[in-house]
Image (cartoon, grey):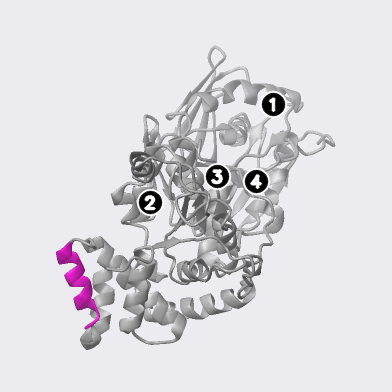
Amino acid sequence: MTGLGRTRAVALVGLAAHVVEVEAFLAPSLPAFALVGLPDASLSEARDRVRAAVTASGIAWPNRRITVNLSPAGLPKSGAGFDLAVAVAVLAGAGVLPDPRAARALHVGELGLDGRLRPVRGVLPAVAAAVAAGLPDVVVPAANAAEAALVPGARVHGAASLAEVAAGWGAALPVPDVDPVAPAAASLPAGRHLDLADVAGQEEARLGVEVAAAGGHHLLLVGPPGVGKTMLAERLPGVLPDLDEAEAVEVTAVHSVAGTFDPAGGLLRRPPYEDPHHTATPASIVGGGSGMPRPGAASRAHRGVLFLDEAPEFSPAVLQSLRQPLEHGELVLHRAAGAARYPARFQLVLAANPCPCGRGTGTGAGCTCRSEQRRRYFTKLSGPLLDRVDLQVEVGPVPSRAVAGDGTAVVAARVRAARDAARERLGGTPWRANGEVPGAWLRERWGSSAAPLRELERAVDRGTLSRRGVDRVVRVAWTLADLAGRTTPDAGDVGRAVWLRTRGTGL
């Protein structure tokens, strides 16, 4: 007797999810099991996991020649998340699962040798793709059910074992009472309840943080150790507005694929914060790994903050790898198994000492670095990278009698008002904040009041600013105007933007 069974699964290539038809053809021939359709090594091993899980579930393994095809065959497929779909297709072809609805349902999950279902990464984008393709019925491991249920329109069934899934599709077998496999502990950042009021003094640096939050600008903080650079960077996410619905789904999908998402808290509504150590490799920052690359810190910081403390200590390869996401807001990682595309529109915050010893300015202890050491240290931050950083602020020592400024709640309210003004101006465009807008578009909006731009043009002629630098100054000027409640920037906004761009040196 020959049988053909079908069901659906999902292949993730970066954040792009593709619905895959899983077909199992059982022929009366010598027993064998072939898996075709560009599976990777972990997926090819599904043959042994599925056979053991079926037997452990009390179902007789069909002693026939089994060919499982994953269609479209030209799409690379990876991971153990196909195990459940392969098992369902085989059992449907063997006549064990009489319910025809199994062919239209999505099955995602890894099988243990005892037949239990183990959770997998990337369930949120997988289920979203299935629902968008008109496949609302999804079967996932019990540990992934809460995450799958976050997708509107999905009819989710969380199962603890293969036997439970088979019985749900009409198989005549007892369902053992097994404990669901608990999800692996996600590497989540510690909860942050940090207030800007903790930072005493530092009016200029606090202004830089507020402007960065209001316009989505990148920020460089330069100053000796102990003046509060890290404290300021850690408090930037707190003044950023909540993510809207589309942003929350996008950010949550990235963290689902990365394995850093806890579904118990629902969608991620707050901007993420990533602060990798300066010994981090390029792969850990931009993403990588064997087979299909996984998202790195830059993508996990999407719609949030990526903070590089002691930035000149990072390897040049890491720093240069950030130029693509800073310019385009996404990362495209090419590997032998295919290309993965991850969003990476983050706010970059760099912190640096003025020199290797850290005492280059204002501490009174005196700098012990030679001039070539100072030059070599800071030039690790290349010109092309710094040219993409809108705000560059000097952070000096704090006087003993310095007082705290406004707290996070007060600053966040001003930031929200400025973001609302920018959102109204940018309505109907693909941009959401001033830091994303081309300078040419903003200059056109200036109209006849663009006299302050003439000084910037003279700065280009003198070589003080690059053309990209002029665009960055224009963006910051519009953000300053939004914070002040003005409809267009004035000469004072342009001057302040130049000051924030050039670490207080002006033109």
Q: CA distance from mark 3 to mark 1?
A: 28 Å
Which amino acid type is marked by label 4? Val
Task: Kindly identify which residue carries mark 3.
Answer: 257
Question: Does dot 4 land on a helix, a strand or a loop?
Answer: strand
The local secondary structure at tag 2 comes to helix
Residue that mark 4 sits on: 139
Q: Is residue 392 above or below residue 144?
A: below
Task: Look at mark 2 in the image and give the residue it sits on.
Answer: 325
> Is label 1 in a helix, a strand or a loop?
helix
Q: Earlier in the sequence, mark 4 or mark 3?
A: 4
The amino acid type, in three-letter code, at marker 3 is: Val
38 falls in the magenta region: no
Whether residue 353 sits left or right of residue 261 in the image: it is left
Q: Is residue 199 left or right of residue 44?
A: right
Residues at discs 2 and 1 in contact (Cβ within 8 Å): no
**In the displayed structure, does residue 382 sit left or right of residue 6?**
left
Query: In the rendered image, which quarter is residue 372 located in?
Result: top left
Which residue sits at x=53%, y=14%? 29
In this rendering, is residue 276 above or below 115? below
- Residue that numbered label 1 is attached to: 54
